[in-house]
Amino acid sequence: MPANPKADSQASVRIGLVGAGRWGRNYIKTARSLDTVDLVGVASGNPQTRSLVGPTCRVVGNWARLLEDDGIEGLIIATPPAAQVEIALAALGRGVPVLLEKPMALSTADARRIVDRSRATGTAGMVDHVYLFNPAFQALLSAVGAVDDVVGVRAEGGAHGPFRDDFPTLWDWAPHDVAMCLALFGDAPQDVTCREREGVSPGELFDIDLSFAGGRTANLTLGNGFAAKVRRFTVTLRSGAELVFDDVADDRFVRVVDGQAQVVEVDAEAPLTRAVRMFGEGVRAGGFDISDLAFGLKVVDVIARRTG
């Protein structure tokens, strides 16, 4: 990766963004709230994008034109995963670190192409598995202690919709829960089974069982067929205690001991703010190692291995 001219500077990092849809607009709002990053270019076909960005931010219709700007030091890609592979490969090929949306691809082969390009160019980046940046989930990981203390995980994640024609429901929701499980257990599962529930309409619900070393299991229910939004991740410890991350509840992290709930206070920083801030810090420091993209590849591979 070329030397970063701002590695030793406190000047804001010049960031580009591809995509200004619903999540892309969240990136725009987040980037504009941070002093450490400067959104200097957006690739978007939406004519309303111009009104969302600052006066010095360039708006172009084609992402390739955005990469022609040698001043861009990092690129956020907020497009559907089928589209972001080509963009990521091009950015990494130009030595530009990337922040990718989850999942980083829709197949193990495409995810591996991104990792291979990263290794070949010495340029890497991050994948925005957004719940991994949630302060409540990070506090849960810190509270676990040793993986040997974990018996298993129960998780529910989803909502009523969205109902997409161009994005498989399983790939829309599973990356969240799978990423949290891999972060907890530190490795990929030995076995994966996936079953779609019958009679769910509208939408889809999936039951996924992951089997990890040491007999530890994770039982996940996810999809867009819930009556309302749910995001609950419960870790059961050998002591009988439970650690509960619930991003919908007022108390996002609770420790349950002998049936008594103990609320744990957590940082208030928004997960997306933390992700973008960390991306900017990584770019300023001169780059990233391969570990985060390699982790994203593992997430994709787990979902691609589904059976049943």
Image (cartoon, rainbow, N blue to C red):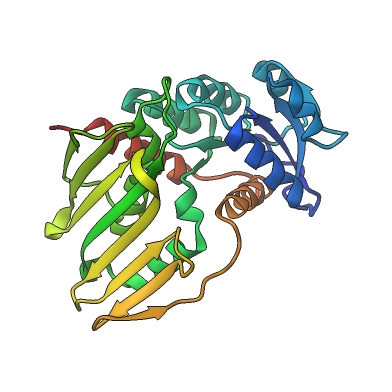
Q: Is residue 217 above or below residue 307?
A: below
Please state the horizontal and vertical placement of residue 43, each as a whole percent of the image.
Answer: 69, 23
Which image quadrant is residue 106 in?
top left
The residue drawn where x is 74% and y is 28% is 49
Please state the horizontal and vertical placement of residue 58, each as a whole percent of the image.
Answer: 81, 27
Please state the horizontal and vertical placement of residue 105, each as a whole percent of the image.
Answer: 41, 28
Viewer-proximal residue among 170 and 69: 170
Which image quadrant is residue 154 in?
bottom left
Viewer-proximal residue among 146 and 269: 269
Left or right of 15? Residue 134 is left
Name the image quarter holding the N terminus.
Answer: top right
The residue drawn where x is 18% and y is 52% is 212
Name the image quarter holding the C terminus.
Answer: top left
Left or right of 198? Residue 51 is right
Left or right of 287? Residue 56 is right
Q: Is residue 289 above or below residue 72?
A: below
